Image (cartoon, grey):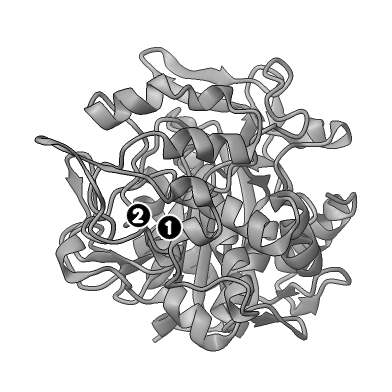
């Protein structure tokens, strides 16, 4: 990670505040007034009102909202505090835990290798990770062989057969494998391979460690460690200067605390000055949830995706590859996708992103074709191609995951588009 983000973020904040178009000197972010991108400043002002209300009601300590349309950033503001006890205000360059927002970037990295012919989407994952060749599937009648191998594309759309673990027999096997004691990514996947799959590959959608496994595929196919490949091929060229698997010492003052909602208000559950988990490079580089970053960094990534895989004069992915990411790729029997008892009606999954496939009462403000995802600390992002490639990134640090900010802001932001 580099040291220019505070300057870049300040330039961006000033340019948006001045409501004028600009192109920052670093990274190519173009700023404009909402009106220049076909949006209403007056209606977008409601975003600040709603965010400040959440802070006042102790729903969140603080947050950052970034909005772009037609390739131009029209809104980038911070609200509340990044650390309540320390009295530190949230800044637009505050670094947060991205958790599962990591998944889309690692999927994109793997697809870059697909475009180069170094990874085959329809190859068995065991081609790259032999330890997975002998994996079995748990059934109520005992362990059975998979009907077909786990394919690389299964990892990207969560149809591989893995899960995150629970009280079922598969979860118990994962606990016995002591995944948290893995010494590196290779060891982690080897331990995971000793556990049975929760279902037959390709037959269901279950959120899982699949993209962590994909991170190892990237390592094997590229010959580089995951963090090195991500920085060389994606983060550094895009100007994602504050994104990585840990926060360097000289940036720790910008790292937000993480909270939960307690009966007496917000309670800190992860303080950057106490928990050293993010102070140095971790032994296991989690492609499923290990990254930290900022709103402007992630906006750069999404601008590239929304532009068909090219940005600021450089191509990262083929347009047809981006189309696979942003359109539903699930087998018919895998619908609908769900987390526990919550069923996401009208939602499918592409390669790395969820995709809105129909209008339903679940997330009623969403538009068909919208793609995105979120992270465990209630961070959110979505892109709507039919609305001038509207991009929204909202970063907060509240666990467990909730949709409050996304569902509160989504109708207001869509309403701000001039029709």
Do the residues bearing badges 2 and 1 touch, measured as CB atoms within 8 Å? yes
Question: Residue, x 73% and y 37% (percent of image)?
Answer: 246
Q: Name the residue under label 1.
A: 155
Is disc 2 placed on a helix, strand or loop? loop
Question: Residue, x 59% and y 51% (percent of image)?
Answer: 216
Q: Name the residue under label 2.
A: 160
Above or below, 414 against 374 in this view is below
Which of the image's four quarters has the C terminus? bottom left
Label tally: 2
Question: Residue, x 76% and y 81% (percent of image)?
Answer: 312
Q: Circle 2: is it few (<14), some (14-19), or many (20+) Cα within 10 Å?
A: many
| Residue at mark 2 to residue at mark 1: CA–CA distance | 6 Å
x, y (%) of residue 180? 53, 24
Above or below, 355 against 419 in this view is above
Residue extending farthest left: 141
x, y (%) of residue 147? 23, 58
Question: Residue, x 57% and y 75% (percent of image)?
Answer: 114
Quarter holding residue 319: bottom right
Quarter holding residue 218: bottom right
Above or below, 334 against 40 in this view is above
Quarter holding residue 275: top right
Residue extending farthest top: 264
Is disc 1 placed on a helix, strand or loop? helix
Q: Is residue 252 left or right of residue 207?
A: right
x, y (%) of residue 381? 48, 58
Instruction: Work out whether mark 2 precedes mark 1 in sequence or the reverse, and give the earlier one.
Output: 1
Q: Determine if residue 385 is in view.
A: yes
């Amino acid at each position: 990670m580099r040291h220019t983000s505070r300057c870049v973020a300040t330039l961006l904040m000033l340019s948006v505040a001045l409501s004028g178009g600009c192109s920052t000197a670093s990274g190519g972010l173009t700023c404009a007034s909402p009106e220049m991108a076909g949006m209403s400043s007056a209606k977008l002002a409601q975003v600040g009102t709603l965010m400040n209300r959440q802070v006042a009601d102790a729903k969140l300590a603080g947050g950052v909202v970034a909005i772009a349309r037609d390739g131009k950033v029209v809104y980038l503001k911070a609200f509340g505090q990044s650390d309540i006890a320390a009295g530190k205000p949230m800044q637009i360059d505050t670094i947060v835990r991205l958790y599962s927002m990591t998944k889309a970037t690692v999927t994109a990295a793997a697809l870059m290798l697909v475009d180069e012919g170094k990874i085959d989407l329809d190859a068995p994952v065991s081609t790259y990770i032999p330890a997975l060749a002998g994996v079995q599937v748990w059934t109520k009648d005992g362990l059975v062989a998979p009907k077909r191998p786990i394919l690389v594309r299964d990892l990207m759309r969560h149809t591989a057969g893995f899960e995150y673990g629970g009280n079922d027999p598969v979860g118990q096997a994962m606990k016995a494998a002591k995944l948290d004691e893995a010494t590196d990514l290779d060891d982690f996947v080897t331990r995971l391979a000793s556990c049975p799959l929760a279902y037959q590959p390709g037959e269901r959608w279950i959120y899982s460690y699949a993209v962590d496994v994909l991170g190892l595929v990237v390592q094997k196919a590229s010959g580089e460690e995951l963090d090195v490949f991500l920085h060389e091929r994606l983060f550094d060229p895009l100007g994602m200067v504050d994104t990585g698997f840990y926060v360097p010492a000289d940036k720790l003052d910008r790292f937000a605390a993480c909270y939960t909602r307690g009966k007496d208000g917000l309670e800190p559950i992860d303080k950057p000055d106490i928990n050293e988990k993010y102070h140095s490079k971790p032994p296991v580089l989690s492609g499923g949830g290990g990254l930290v970053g900022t709103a402007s960094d992630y906006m750069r990534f999404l601008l590239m995706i929304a532009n068909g895989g090219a940005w600021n004069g450089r191509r990262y992915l083929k347009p047809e590859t981006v189309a696979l990411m942003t359109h539903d790729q699930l087998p018919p029997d895998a619908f609908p996708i769900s987390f526990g008892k919550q069923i996401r009606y009208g939602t499918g999954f592409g390669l790395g992103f969820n995709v809105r496939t129909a209008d339903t009462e679940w997330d009623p403000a969403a538009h068909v074709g919208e793609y995105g995802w979120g992270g465990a600390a209630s961070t959110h992002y979505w892109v709507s191609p039919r609305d001038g490639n509207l991009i929204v990134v909202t970063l907060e640090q509240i666990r467990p995951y909730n949709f409050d900010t996304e569902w509160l802001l989504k109708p207001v932001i869509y309403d701000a588009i001039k029709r």
